[in-house]
Image (cartoon, grey):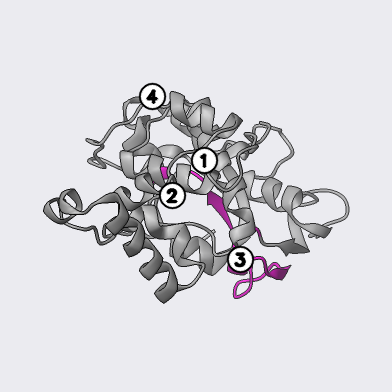
Amino acid sequence: MSRKPSKSRGKSTRFSKRRASAATPLERILLLLVVVALGGVGAGVGLPNLSPEIGKVTGETTASGPAADALAKLTVDDSQSGRGYDRDAFGYRETDDDGNGCDIREDILARDLKDVTYKSVTGHGSCQVKSGTLDDPYTGKTIHFTRGVETSTAVQIDHVVALENAWQSGTSSWDSARRRQFGNDPYNLLAVDGPANQDKGSASAAYWLPTNSAYRCEYVARQIGVKTKYSLTVTSAEKDAMLAVLHTCPAQQLPES
């Protein structure tokens, strides 16, 4: 997998505190309707990011169900810092916990692709994926994967909770063994469209969601599951964005580990 560049995600435009406090609930709702009319149905997904006030007035940041209940138990920390972050500290692809002779990328490709063929039928390399088909969860596209210098990056392995986000959320204080466990945990890894993975970078749910709207509930639920498993924190903006997604799927479960 190509390394994801660390991307600075500018915060979404927000209404000034003075203006938000001056508006009445009716005015806020009218403003919401104008935004939806101008931006279409898709704009509704991002509204809590654009204006937390609107999201709260309209109930967009309220949710129920198992995933929402787990989210409510996570610690909110708005003073997170990425100081000292080093992707190599997580040892991604440097372990072979199942002892099959291949790193975690091969294991995830074999798990998530269909019609998989392997580089070698017997002997060394028998677990290295040669080709397969991915129903990409992030874009909804079908991707035909073929191993090669110029083709392998079409499918990349994404850390659903990005490593830099995890560093900011609590892993910076861990020892190297625990960070390596996190960096190679299949529960936090998905085979996905390469360009979508690059576009996401290190963004949290506050600043990036899959373009495939049908997958957003499961995506957010997996992030919550990972953060619950490792006792990581969320920011207020991240939590509100997650709640806005879960608002549309009140029965959402956490993925099984």
Q: Identify the residue position indicated by label 1 in the image.
A: 223
**Which label is found at residue 139?**
3
Confirm or deny contact between disc 3 and disc 1 (CB under 8 A).
Answer: no
Residue at figure coordinates x 43%, y 68% from the top left: 36
The image shows residue 19, relative to residue 254, as above or below, that is: below
Residue 77: horizontal and vertical position, in percent? 29, 32
Category of crowding for the residue at label 2, using alpha-carbon neighbours closer than 10 angstroms: few (below 14), some (14–19), many (at least 20): many
Q: Identify the residue position indicated by label 4 in the image.
A: 175
Residue at figure coordinates x 24%, y 58% from the top left: 14
The image shows residue 239, relative to residue 70, as above or below, that is: below
Labels in figure, total:
4
Q: Which residues are magenta?
A: 137-164
Is label 3 or label 4 in front?
Answer: 3
The residues bearing labels 1 and 4 have C-alpha atoms spaced at a distance of 22 Å
Q: Earlier in the sequence, mark 1 or mark 4?
A: 4
Please indicate, yes or no, whether residue 6 appears anywhere in the rendered image: no
Residue 241: horizontal and vertical position, in percent? 42, 47
The residues bearing labels 2 and 3 have C-alpha atoms spaced at a distance of 16 Å
Category of crowding for the residue at label 1, using alpha-carbon neighbours closer than 10 angstroms: few (below 14), some (14–19), many (at least 20): many
Dot 4 falls on a residue whose secondary structure is loop
- Residue 49 position by quadrant: bottom left
The residues bearing labels 3 and 1 have C-alpha atoms spaced at a distance of 18 Å
Q: Earlier in the sequence, mark 3 or mark 4?
A: 3
Q: Earlier in the sequence, mark 3 or mark 1?
A: 3
- Residue 213 position by quadrant: bottom right
Whether residue 153 appears in magenta in the rendering, the answer is yes
Dot 2 falls on a residue whose secondary structure is loop
